[in-house]
Amino acid sequence: MSMIPLEYYAPVFGLFLLLLLVIFVPRERYKELFWFGLVWGFLFSTAATFLISEVFHLFHYERVKPFILFGAPLWLTFAWIPAVMLYLHFLPEGGEWYVFPLYLLGFAVTGMEIDGVLNQGGLLVYDHWSPFCRFFLSLGWFYL
């Protein structure tokens, strides 16, 4: 049995990513990276979740009300802001040819695993979805 109630998974995850951001990203980079996090993190995840859950009905979230926006849990969409900021901060510049593909695969696998944890926890219910689908979505998302 989990020590954290199910309803607190999303806020705790969002605060955990914010803590990682504060620890690893210098304050001077916040202003530069925030807008990318807002657009590619918050807005894109809200739009993608709306399309996937409300339009195509591939999955849906449970036990996240009243903090839901267009079918997406507000805390999880906010969590994408520091996630994208961390991704861009650690994005490898140059180096060997295989560094960026491995970095990209690492983030895509992480997104797939988080998807699986949310499903196993009961927050994310698959209608016609799987973590494997999330892997390809994340792969395309982080490649852009």
Image: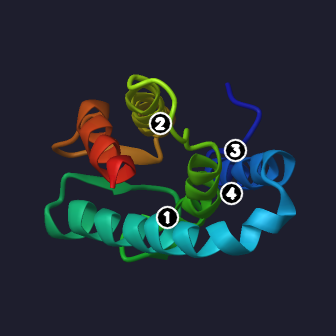
Residue 27 pos. (x, y %)? 85, 63
Secondary structure under the numbered disc 1 in the rendered image: helix
Q: Amino acid at mark 1?
A: Gly
Q: Give the residue drawn at x 40%, y 22%.
A: 98
Q: Are marks 3 and 4 in contact (CB under 8 Å)?
A: no
Query: Circle 4 sits on which residue?
Result: 11
Q: Give the residue drawn at x 55%, y 56%.
A: 84
Query: Circle 1 sits on which residue?
Result: 41
- The label nearer to you, 4 versus 1, is 1
Secondary structure under the numbered disc 4 in the rendered image: helix
The quadrant the C terminus occupies is bottom left
Query: Circle 3 sits on which residue?
Result: 5
Distance Cα–Cα, label 1 vs label 3:
25 Å
Q: Give the residue drawn at x 27%, y 48%.
A: 140
Distance Cα–Cα, label 4 vs label 1:
16 Å
- The label nearer to you, 4 versus 2, is 2
Q: Nearer the viewer, residue 140 or 119?
A: 140
Badge 1 or badge 3: first in the primary sequence:
3
